[in-house]
Structure formats: structure tokens, C-alpha cells
Amino acid sequence: MKETEKIELKKSTSELKEALKSIVAILNKHHKGELYFGVKNDGKVIGQDVTEKTIREISQAISSNIDPIIYPSVEEIKIGKKSCVKVTFSGVDGPYFSNGRAYIRVGDEDKKLNKNELEKLILKRKKEYWDQCYSDIKLNQIKERTLKNYVKKGRIAGRITFNYKNKSSTLRKLGLIRDKRLLKAAEVLFCDENLLEIQAAVFASKTKTTFLDIKVFKGNLFSLLSQSEAYISEKLNWRAEIKGFKREEIPEIPIEAIREALVNSLCHRDYYRQENNKIAVYKDRIEIWNPGTFPHGLEPKDYIKNEVESVLRNPSIAKILYYSKDIESWGSGLRRMYNLCKSNNLKIEFKNTAYGFNVIFFRPVSKTVEKTREKTREKTREKTREKIILIIQESPEITTEEIAQQIGISQKGVEWQIKKLKEEKIIVRIGPDKGGHWKIKK
């Protein structure tokens, strides 16, 4: 290992104060980087004692002393056979300060910024967007079929006036080539070889304790939209209605609202951060999350109730989605989702957190569905009850803890079942809890 403009090495957490300066310097120059504790600056791995307290102290030092606040990943790793700490960080809301001072990375050193340099950095940050930075991909990596289909869709929408000719001229007309180099917007929109992913999962209940299915979708932005929409559609409950002698399939949540949430999550996410977009399907709700916090000083209700100017985090991506009519107009997405759900008597919630933005669609529960669920729960309880009686028949001295382990449910669940069996005088306890045994009466 060796130090670079994006990698900093520290022999131990005794150098934590200096480490904070390095994090700030790298953020102000490159927006992201890595720092390792347990490695000397010449690259020699010496290791570091790592406990939960160590991880917590590093995280707290970063959140307390770096402004604006960032949310790094702090983890123990093995380099060779030695324990070290890896800190992965990113941020685009600079300039960043450590204990009130700003630094910039020069080679493998951290240089303190003077007043003029700081002013230049602030002006530069105001004009710099991730999607307008240069990409490392080449023209031959652009998926031509996706680009052709996009132009066709834009022409049908009436927002693109030219025909497709070739990759180069089309991307230039769309503003995705500058100085003969592709921009990052082109990378995520029309190239499958990018870092953009969506993690999707279906959970068995209202919590994340047990999942029934998990998928990771990869590809260009338009492919991800299609894959995600299809995935959620498969998990929805659908009902059939006859309208004008035609059978119409109606989903429990409007597909238009779900697609709007998916488009927003990819258009407005913070691409400087490394987290995946996430889709979570629960028994009672569907959540669509992205790592991009809401604009400072604004709330979701401002866009639902009022006419508020849209704050674009990725203006080039937003412009492309507008041309194809995947976005109807700036700042109208939340209102459209809200109105679609309201007209279908559905509850929707928008959650702005320190880590990202979440759209939550609450699934309707009909009386028929609830009755079916109750029947299923009753059958499950009955089967569990039968298993407990059989186990007690074979091993009268067995404990509730051992029964729980055999059946695969919680000990409290077993105790609840046994209480019911005792009340119904099906079983009785002979002797004390320790040393006694069960007897089946009927």
C-alpha cells in the first residue's frame, strides 16, 4: 500500500486528529477517498487494536469535527493477518472543514487553504455537478440500441426534434459530450458498465427479520427502471374489474406512482455516495429509497402543496429524462405521486433522513385479505400446537427452551401455546419447573 491523493495511511488512532485533516483535504479535492489506521505512511502494515469502542470513537470524531457533516463507512479489515481500520468517505457539499480549518490534497500531503484559495473552491463547488464531470468510459461502451430507443421515445413525446444518426452526434446534441469526452451522465444513462445498482428485497413480515427474496439489478438507468418496475409489479396484489365488457387488471398501488418514485430515486440520488438505491417490499408497505437527501431548507410538503422551484442535483440526467417524458415537469413528481395515491384512498409518506430520501407506499388491507391472513395464522398455530403435544409425548421432561429449538419458534411462542393447552386441560405439569415433567390428560 502507498499514500496517494485519494488514500491516506495512519499508524494508529493516536493520529486521529491528523486523520481528520486528511479526510477533509481529500474531500475538497476529489469528493471521496479512503483512510487506513494500522498502516505506516511508508506502506508497512503494523496493525491496530480494534474494538467496538475504537470504531465508535472514529465515527464520533468524524461526525463531531468535520463540517459539513459526512457519514463514512468505518470497519475492521484484515491486511495479511493484522487487524486494521478502513474508513471510506465521500461528500459533495464542500468545502469541508476540520475543526474550523479547510485543507486541500496535494500529492500525499494536506495543505491548509488560504482565504483566496477557499473563495475559489467555493465558487468552483457552486458550479460543479457530478453528472457534468468527465467520465472514463469510451464511446464504444455506449449501448447503441438504448440510445436509439431513447431518441425515438423523445421524438414521440415531441421534445426531441432530430433523428438518430450515430452515437457521437446524438450524444453531442444531447449535451453529453464536452471537449471530445463523455460526461458521467452519459455513463449512467446509456452504458451498462457503471457502478449504479438497485438492491431489491421482499420481506416476510413488517420488519427486516426474514426475507423471502433478494435481487440486485445492474445496467443503464433505463434498464434499471424497467427491471425495478417489473419486480414490484410481480409482488403487488391485483384485482380484476369488468369495464365496458372488458376485463381490466388493477394493481393495489398505481403503477404510475411507483414508476414516478423510481424515476425520482435515480434522477435525484447523490451519485458521489457509494450506496445502492433500495426497494423493500413488506407485508404492509413498499419502500423506495435513494442516497440523496432533500434540498436544504425544503420539505416534501412544500412540493405537494405549493409551487416550489425544483433544486436539481443532477441537471444533465434530469434534462435527458425530461426529453423522453420520463419526467413531466420540474418539481412535480411528489405532487403527482401524492395525488395518485389520494385518488385511490391510499396512504403515502415521504421521509427525508440524514442518509437519504424514502418514498413509502402503504398497501391496502381488504377484509377478504385480512380473513385469509387470519386463517393462515390459525392453521400455523394449530400445527405448532400439534407439534408441541407430539414432542411432550415423546419427551415428558423436555423444557420450553428445548421445544422452541426443535420447532424453530421463540420460547415465548412455546410458553403461550403451553398456557393455552393447560387452560384447556389438555396437558398438566407434574412437579416443579426443574425436575418435573409434563403429562397429557386428553
Image (cartoon, rainbow, N blue to C red):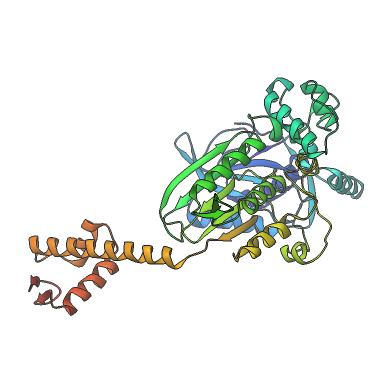
Residue plotted at (49% across, 49% down) = 235
Q: In the rendered view, would you say 293 is above or below 6?
A: below
Residue 147 percent location from the top left of the image: 72, 28
Residue 394 lies, in percent from the top left, at 8, 60
Q: Quadrant of the N terminus?
A: top right
Where is 251 relative to 379, above or below? above
Based on the displayed image, in which of its 4 quarters is residue 243 positioned?
Answer: bottom right
> Quick one: which residue is furthest to the front in this view?
245
At a point 92% along the width and 47% down the height, the residue shown is 116
User: On the picture, is 240 further left or further right than 127?
Assistant: left
- Relative placement, left or right, of 127 versus 360 is right
Horizontal arrangement in the rendering, residue 264 relative to residue 76 (left or right): right
> From the image, which quarter does the C terminus lie in?
bottom left
Residue at (57% x, 48% y) in the render: 278
Residue 426 seen in the figure = yes
- Image quadrant of residue 127? top right
